[in-house]
Image (tube, rainbow, N blue to C red):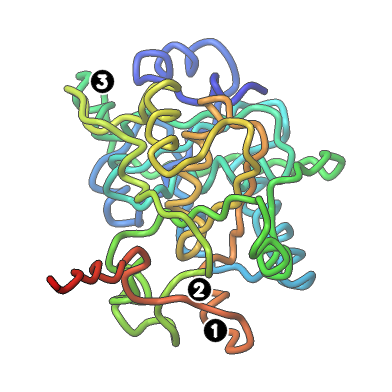
Amino acid sequence: MSAATVLISPAELGTLMNSEPVVVIDTRDADTYLAGHIPGAVNLREIFTFLATSTAEGLSELKGTFAQHFGAVGLSGKETAVFYEDALNSGYGQSCRGYYLLTWLGYPKIKVLNGGYSAWKASGLATSTETVTPTPATFPADLKMADVMLTKDEMLAALGTNTVLLDVRDIDEWIGDSSSPYGKDYAPRKGRIPGAKWLEWYRFMKPSAQGPMIKSPDEVKAEAATAGISTDDTVYLYCFKGARASNTFLALKQAGFSDVRMYFGSWNEWSRDPALPIESGLPFAEAKPKLAMAA
């Protein structure tokens, strides 16, 4: 499936729901879901909350957990999965995290609602407060998993190579002022992976009448170019737990970046291993040039 076809507008989603089997997945918390959601949508908060590690055991748990979750909400391989959050800039990329997980698992039909629930409401489409009980299915066990998942060992091996390590966290995390979006000291160490480039994840979105939307392919390429990143680079993404980086993963893939993978364990895992190197402080601080003294 082309990543260019992943983003779907509210009107397109409305048409799709009336024409083929679709499972619409609301990634917001339960109370927000109950206050109003897309009619027929099921609620799956774990897409955002699950913290993964990149050990063999951790990735096996991640795969098993989400094969079970996605089956429980009705994905058998025949249905198109459509993820949404409240707005693309307010949920830390949680709907895109669902897209990334299903991409990794090899699921064939995945969409993300561009603009989220805010765009759906702005389009004047119907909403519901009825809790939807999913019809469980057996998630397909024979899918070919995609090569988009990185371990901490692979990230460590990429240090000092031509591989682009791209940190997309918020600025306070990048400079080492905060360890996470959950509080300054949530994780044991602050900083960044050495040698990483930085593009804050917000930069791949732009305002619209329906709320923030992921930028066009050319706009995404232009943003990446400001950090010296081009479509033929190998790009390794990370954030704190693979949500904001999923937003960037989708933006880059739909813009034609072919070799993009993500370190899903991200800073939550990296910071907890004291053997792994970190950088902190202002990365581009340069010494002031010395003035020559007049003779």
Question: The disc labelled 3 sits on which kind of residue?
Answer: Leu
Left or right: residue 172 versus residue 166 is: left
In the displayed image of the protein, which residue is found farthest to the front? 295
Quadrant where the image shows the N terminus: top right
Q: Please, what is the three-letter code of the amino acid marked with disc 2? A: Asn
What SS does tag 3 mark? loop
User: What residue lies at 41% left-to-right and 54% top-to-bottom?
Assistant: 198
Badge 1 or badge 3: first in the primary sequence:
3
- Residue 30 appears at what percent x and percent y? 35, 56
Residue found at x 29% / y 71%: 287
Q: Which residue occupies the foreground of this view, 283 or 191?
A: 283
Across and down, in percent, residue 116 comes to 33, 34
Q: What label sits on residue 268 in the rendered view?
A: 2
Q: Is residue 105 above or below residue 209?
A: below
Residue type at mark 1 is Arg
Q: Residues within 10 Å of mark 1 (few under 14, many from 20)?
A: few
Residue 155, x across and y down, in percent: 66, 64
Q: Classify residue 73 as left or right of residue 157.
A: left
Residue 213 % position (x, y): 31, 29
Q: Is residue 4 visible?
A: yes
Crowding around mark 3 (Cα neighbors within 10 Å: few <14, some 14 to 19, many 20+) is: few
Query: Between marks 1 and 3, how big is the CA–CA gap?
Result: 45 Å
Residue linked to disc 3: 125
Cα gap from disc 2 to disc 3, whole angstroms: 38 Å
Most distant residue in the left direction? 294
**Which residue is the site of mark 1?**
272
Left or right? Give the position of 65 relative to 121.
right
Q: Nearer the viewer, residue 107 or 146?
A: 146
Work out which quarter of the rendered image holds the C terminus and state it: bottom left
Label ID, residue 23: none
